[in-house]
Image (cartoon, rainbow, N blue to C red):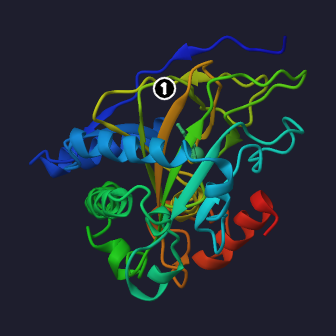
């Protein structure tokens, strides 16, 4: 077996409602430098809404596959079937053992691209309203968190608004279902194979079933994978690749994966990514003569398109 021992990680806990913003910003900075991951508590999304969202998600995934395929992914919205996605083609020839459903920006010009199972008559009457409500609540927590992240980078707290990132942001809610049965295969099958997220920040909610692991040193071999336990009611937040580019790798976009737990698992990842027109370029405070920018400026939309192309071939 090529398995490497894993240990559980004690990630920092950030309180989004703390009145001491300078000290919260400082803790966020340290967490993003050390781990690129932290827990977020007092974020304003009630536990009841979290479990309602996960329970609606479960109802959708329990529909017959023919019904789910009616909402097959189009314009990056809708359903992706089991094994259809492989986040790390180098690790295993099979796709990941998960199915998912993407919900994109709700209002504005992009809102009509979403697909909703509630449009299948009589099925899941409160599905859409629950997801929309959850989306609104979590995006508001995400915006507040980005204010603190800006402070953590010694920027004005409205920095991400000023650069246009939060003007109709490319924010996607992705519902995930990992099956309980392990496929019998000689190859190692992952729930989600090793990857980093593409955007600014991700806010993850899970049903508490274990599986998520992080690798803090992505260039070191063999890779050491550490378990990230769930904390009830907290979001697990991680930094994405575009935030890593903005900060010239000061904040890390950490490699993570989901191992099959031999138990069914539901989670929901909220990817808060910049508006497509926003140009992501090294922050002045994150480079110097001795530490020049590592990445060229890039339009967020171009960057995301390329990453999706590599993951889905479209
Ligand atoms: O389901 C999880 O715990 C993590 C999912 C994830 O990393 C992703 O979808 O990018
Ligand atoms: Fe991820």
Report the quarter where the N terminus lies. top right
Q: What percent of the width, then of the height, locates residue 107?
A: 37, 80
| Residue at 58 percent of width and 64 percent of height | 78
- Can residue 290 be seen by looking at this rendering? no
Give the SS element for disc 1: loop
Residue 17, compared with residue 312, is above or below; it is: above
Q: What percent of the width, then of the height, locates residue 230?
A: 40, 27
Q: Which residue is mark 1?
A: 228
Residue 306, compared with residue 260, is above or below; it is: below
Q: Is mark 1 within 8 Å of ligand 1?
A: no
Total number of numbered labels?
1
Dot 1 surroundings within 10 Å: few (below 14), some, or many (20 or more)? many
- Can residue 209 be seen by looking at this rendering? yes
Residue 67, compared with residue 99, is above or below; it is: below
- Pick out the residue farthest to the bottom: 109
Q: What percent of the width, then of the height, locates residue 259?
A: 65, 26
| Residue at 63 percent of width and 76 percent of height | 297
> With 116 as the anchor, is 198 left or right in this view?
right
Which of the 4 image quarters holds residue 3?
A: top right
- Viewer-proximal residue, 171 or 243? 171
- Viewer-proximal residue, 261 or 53? 53
Report the quarter where the C terminus lies. bottom right
Which of the 4 image quarters holds residue 39?
A: top left
């Amino acid at each position: 077996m090529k398995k490497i021992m894993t240990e559980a990680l004690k990630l920092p806990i950030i309180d989004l409602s703390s009145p001491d913003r300078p000290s919260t910003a400082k803790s966020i900075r340290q967490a993003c430098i050390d781990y690129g991951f932290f827990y977020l508590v007092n974020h304003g999304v009630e536990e009841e809404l979290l479990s309602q969202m996960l329970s609606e998600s479960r109802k959708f995934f329990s529909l017959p596959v023919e019904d789910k395929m009616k909402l097959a992914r189009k314009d990056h919205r809708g359903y992706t079937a089991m094994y259809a996605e492989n986040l790390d083609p180098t690790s295993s020839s099979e796709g990941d053992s998960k199915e998912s459903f993407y919900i994109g920006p709700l209002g504005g010009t992009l809102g009509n691209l979403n697909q909703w199972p509630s449009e299948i008559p009589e099925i899941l009457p409160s599905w859409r309203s629950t997801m929309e409500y959850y989306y609104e609540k979590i995006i508001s927590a995400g915006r507040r968190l980005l204010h603190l992240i800006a402070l953590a980078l010694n920027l004005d707290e409205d920095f991400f608004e000023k650069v246009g990132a939060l003007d109709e942001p490319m924010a996607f809610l992705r519902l995930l279902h990992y099956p309980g049965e392990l496929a019998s295969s000689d190859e190692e099958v992952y729930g989600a194979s090793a990857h980093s997220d593409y955007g600014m920040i991700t806010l993850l909610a899970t049903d508490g079933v274990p599986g998520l692991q992080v690798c803090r040193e992505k260039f070191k071999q063999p890779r050491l994978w550490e378990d990230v336990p769930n904390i009830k009611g907290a979001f697990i937040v991680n930094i994405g690749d575009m935030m890593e580019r903005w900060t010239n790798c000061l904040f890390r976009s950490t490699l993570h994966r989901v191992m099959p737990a031999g138990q069914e698992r539901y989670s929901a990842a909220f990817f808060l990514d910049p508006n497509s027109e926003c140009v992501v370029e090294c922050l002045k405070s994150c480079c110097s003569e001795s530490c020049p920018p590592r990445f060229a400026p890039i339009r967020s939309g171009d960057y995301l398109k390329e990453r999706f192309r590599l993951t889905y071939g479209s």
